[in-house]
Image (cartoon, helix red, strand yellow):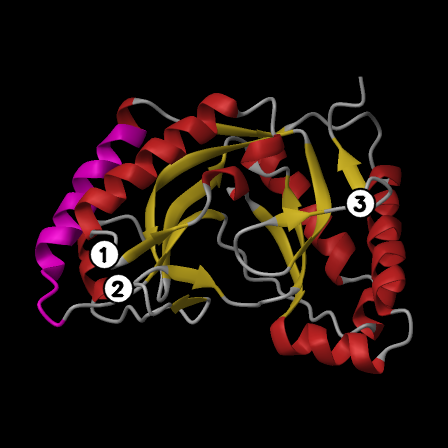
Amino acid sequence: MTLPEAYLSQLEHIQESPKYRLEANGTRIAVPFPGYSVITCPAGESTQNQGFYQNLKTCQHQLEKILGTDLLISVPPESLHLTLADLIWDSSYEVAVQQTPEFEPRLRRAIAQSFTAFTETQTQAPAPIAWQVFGLLVMARAIGVCLVPRDESAYDTTVQIRRMLYQNSDLMALGIEQQYHFTAHITLGYFGKISPELNREKISQALADLNSQWIDSPQELSVHRVELRKFDDMTQYYREPDWPTLRFDPD
């Protein structure tokens, strides 16, 4: 997914993201897209990964120069994060809230159960999970960086967390579907206006050249906690103090 030929192929099929709306004054604003996910602490609140996120912010600026700000809608740098498990969003979320009594409290209790179940399977306090940037990732409506686990432990821990979530019968009863396909990534921006004159070959080569910085200077995300977060759109992820959190640095 991080090879020049993959970029060229993907760029042939990119589409304008429906998560942003073009205003009359030429600016784009995020449209409502409510839901819940289990994610790492967002960049603006992460004290352990400031250098990592600063480098991603720099990467956003580089992408804006390559793609142009009409094509690339950068997400707010403070909201950058890795999603460990998508839960429910958009119309599925809205229907669930309307049809299921006490949906949100039940969701929070179920996530807490899954976090507890994971903790109980550990013979010792789990160490922070380490993920490394492998390169840029072009998706149908967005662009980001692809991550790979630093070692087997990081991979196994992530798989266990996702299994505890998606195999939780209480979550399934709330309409949370099991999603086993997982491409670890951090979204840097969404696609806006796609010009018919877009030079896809030039862009794919520029993205490949930009990838060399990850090879020369590997970037690592140290995951010290994962949390249940709510979002109203794709710009902000928030939580209340008593919402479930799974910590990897209890000391």
Q: Amino acid at mark 1?
A: Tyr
Tell me whether circle 2 and circle 1 mark residues in contact (CB < 8 Å): yes
Q: CA distance from mark 3 to mark 1?
A: 39 Å
Q: Is residue 89 above or below residue 75?
A: below
Query: Of marks 3 and 1, which one's residue comes earlier in the chain?
Result: 1
Q: Nearer the viewer, mark 3 or mark 1?
A: 3
201 part of magenta stretch: yes
Tell me whether circle 3 and circle 1 mark residues in contact (CB < 8 Å): no
Is the residue marked by circle 1 packed among few (<14), some (14-19), or many (20+) residues within 10 Å? many
Residue corresponding to mark 2: 10
Q: Is residue 30 above or below residue 216?
A: below
Residue 190 percent across, percent down from the top left: 37, 58
Image side of residue 140 versus residue 121, left or right: left
Mark 1 lies on a secondary structure that is helix
**Range of residues picked out in magenta:** 196-214
Q: CA distance from mark 2 to mark 3?
A: 38 Å
Residue 72: give its label: none
Give residue 177's quadrant in the image. bottom right
Residue 203 percent across, percent down from the top left: 15, 52
Residue corresponding to mark 3: 240
Image side of residue 27 versus residue 75, left or right: left
Residue corresponding to mark 1: 7
Image side of residue 130 versus residue 107, left or right: left
